[in-house]
Amino acid sequence: METNILQAIGYAASIIIAISMTMSSIVKFRWINLVGASTFAIYGLLINAIPVAFLNGFIVSVDIYYLIRIYGKKEMFETLEIRKDNRYLIRFLEFHNKEIQKFFPGFTYKPEMNTISFFVLRNTKIAGIFLAHREKDGILKVGLDYVAPEYRDFKNGKFIYHRLNDDFVKGGFRRIIAEGITPKHARYLKKLGFLRLNGDLYEKPLINN
């Protein structure tokens, strides 16, 4: 195989592994690292560098092992209601404010706007926070749906917008409205079944089961 092609494979593998190291989500890290290590293992075989191929083959097996554990793990989701003036809530928002602003530019906490406020717990650990308020015609308007970086795998969103559907319906809500100001958050909403209304507004009907 031509030297230029081999070098390209080596560089590509290096770049992929470097990108994996920037991932805050452990799931994304494992998947991207798996691709990078696989590419490096192939590169090692092509240039007859057995130690390189062996080491990266081992990394591939480790990534696969942990991905199987992650996807096979049964997690317990819960909601923990919080009062509008809860001191930990205020501290949580302050601590994560920089990250929150990436997905909800201009967000400021307004206690009077929160009809529903709760932390999302995964195996008793705080994975995210959900703040929303009631509007007319049975609308639940989401003010903040923030998930900590290490838990950004859509499980929180599926729990809130699918498994809590009946709870929202019992609360008198008929649909949920949320803003997808940033492209990443807009994709998140679409993946969870929201439909674009107009501009940055997205809607998800609540089903009465």
Image (cartoon, rainbow, N blue to C red):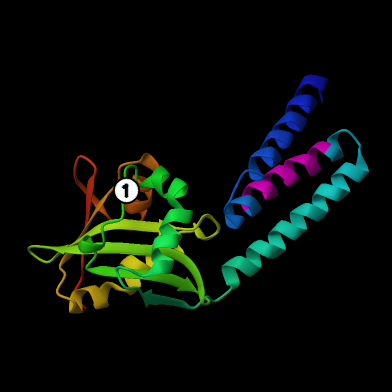
Image location (x, y in percent) of residue 67: 64, 62
Q: Quadrant of the N terminus?
A: top right
Q: Secondary structure at mark 1?
A: loop
Locate residue 74 relative to residue 22 in the image: left or right: left
- Please tell me whether the stretch drawn in magenta is mainly helix, strand or loop: helix
Q: Residue at x 34, y 64 (%)?
A: 130
- Circle 1 packing at 10 Å, graded few (<14), some (14-19), many (20+), is few
Is residue 156 something one can see in this rendering? no
| In magenta segment, residue 78 | no
In the image, residue 94 sits, relative to residue 198, either above or below, namely below
Name, please, the residue furthest toward the left: 137
Is residue 16 something one can see in this rendering? yes
Towards the viewer: 67 or 164: 164
Towards the viewer: 14 or 156: 156
In the image, residue 153 sits, relative to residue 19, either above or below, namely below
Q: Residue at x 49, y 58 (%)?
A: 148
| In magenta segment, residue 41 | yes
Q: Quadrant of the C terminus?
A: bottom left
In the image, residue 36 sits, relative to residue 171, either above or below, namely above
Q: Residue at x 41, y 50 (%)?
A: 100
Image location (x, y in percent) of residue 205: 19, 63
Q: What is the magenta range?
A: 31-43
The residue type indicated by label 1 comes to Phe
Q: Residue at x 52, y 75 (%)?
A: 75
Image location (x, y in percent) of residue 60: 75, 53
Image location (x, y in percent) of residue 153: 49, 58
Towards the viewer: 42 or 187: 187
Name the residue that disc number 1 marks: 107
Towards the viewer: 68 or 142: 142
